[in-house]
Amino acid sequence: MISHRKYMELALSLAARGRGDVSPNPLVGALIVKRGRIVGRGWHKKCGDAHAEVCALKEAGRKAKDSIMYVNLEPCSHWGRTPPCTEQIVSAGVREVVVAMKDPNPKVNGYQELKFRGIKTRIGILEEEAKKLNEPYIKWIRSKRPLVVVKAAMSLDGQIATRTGDSKYITGREARKFVHELRAEYDAVMVGINTVLKDNPQLTVRLVKGRNPIKIVVDTKLKINANAKIIKNEGSKLIIATSKKAPKTKVKRLLQKGVHVLVVDAKNGKVDLKQLVKELGKRDICSILVEGGAELNAEAIKSGITDKVLFFISPQFIGKGLGALGDLGINKVDKSIKLKDLDYRKIGRDILIEGYL
């Protein structure tokens, strides 16, 4: 009996190789199997490059005839940056196509197209795993807004810094390396101005191999120092989100340094985060990792822009210090925000809790 799950797992692992390089396109992997042997592999490597199905067909060559193709996302059936994959699948003589999930893009109807063309098709193998892999793409395609994830590292008693502001380092090296891997996968990392003024962070992926994300600084009154590391090192990949309260002369100086200054409305005296993520979505930013302090973390959750949280818990006590979240306006326990679909992992000495809002 053919193990569709086994081959789809391999297609998903191939797709994951494109992390950090394909956005705003989805992560896609394809596997071609003939008589129980893998004859072709492919994955989407970069936005604008050949799709996974085409790469796998190219590797398989003539062996693609009468084969089974496994792909984690419904093949495209329309002209975009590249020709439709459905045409090339049909031309290659593939006998059967097994798909993990339907593409949420309304332009794509590859599953039905292949069926119409006489190819045996089935869909839904490891569907949940496929959806998890492409969370940012699914959110962006459906809403034109990025997937927003709030990340924090705290002690066992919920502190992200001591009362003197010291926070280096609450988590161990393994967890810090994992965060750098996350940065390489996300389109952008967002922090508040207080984090920039206090820590002068670089927000790079220096602990791992990968591309540095776009940096977003939420700075309502444009307090940022022109000599901040984030400006000197990453000016062209930096977006400063500010309000009309920002001094025009400072906006001009930052623009001259190659920084992108995004002026949005203020809400309750702060940058309107809902409007901000809408504007970022228009710029093809599909995923944002929020690495703010207590205030930005709380605002991101209160405003309703947050989809998921990643909280690292370190097995140590700090006592009175700075909490991971600012005021959420909750007065009763039964009104507290409950996380869904929880997952727990041990990373080095620390525990990572992942949950959805």
Image (cartoon, rainbow, N blue to C red):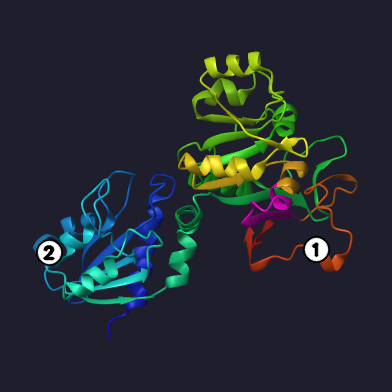
Residue at image point 32% right, 77% down: 4
Residue at image point 61% right, 49% down: 174
Label 1: how many Cα within 10 Å (few below 14, some 14–19, many 20+): few
Residue at image point 9% right, 63% down: 62
Estimate the x, y position of residue 151 in percent, counting from the top left.
Answer: 66, 49
- Which residue is more in the foreground, 45 or 261? 261
**Rendered view: 10 above or below 248:** below
Estimate the x, y position of residue 89 in percent, counting from the top left.
Answer: 18, 64
What amino acid is found at the position of numbered circle 1 in the picture? Ser
Magenta stretch bounds: 300-314
What amino acid is found at the position of numbered circle 2 in the picture? Ala
Query: Is residue 290 visible to us here?
Result: no
Q: Residue furthest bottom?
A: 1
- Which residue is more in the foreground, 174 or 109? 109
Estimate the x, y position of residue 339 in percent, counting from the top left.
Answer: 69, 65
In this picture, residue 41 sits left or right of residue 47: left
Residue at image point 47% right, 57% down: 142
In this picture, residue 68 sits left or right of residue 100: left
Per the rendering, the mark at residue 218 is none
Q: Which residue is mark 2?
A: 92
* Quadrant holding the C terminus: bottom right
| Magenta segment includes 307 | yes
Estimate the x, y position of residue 238 in percent, counting from the top left.
Answer: 55, 29
- Disc 2, SS: helix
Q: Which residue is mark 1?
A: 336
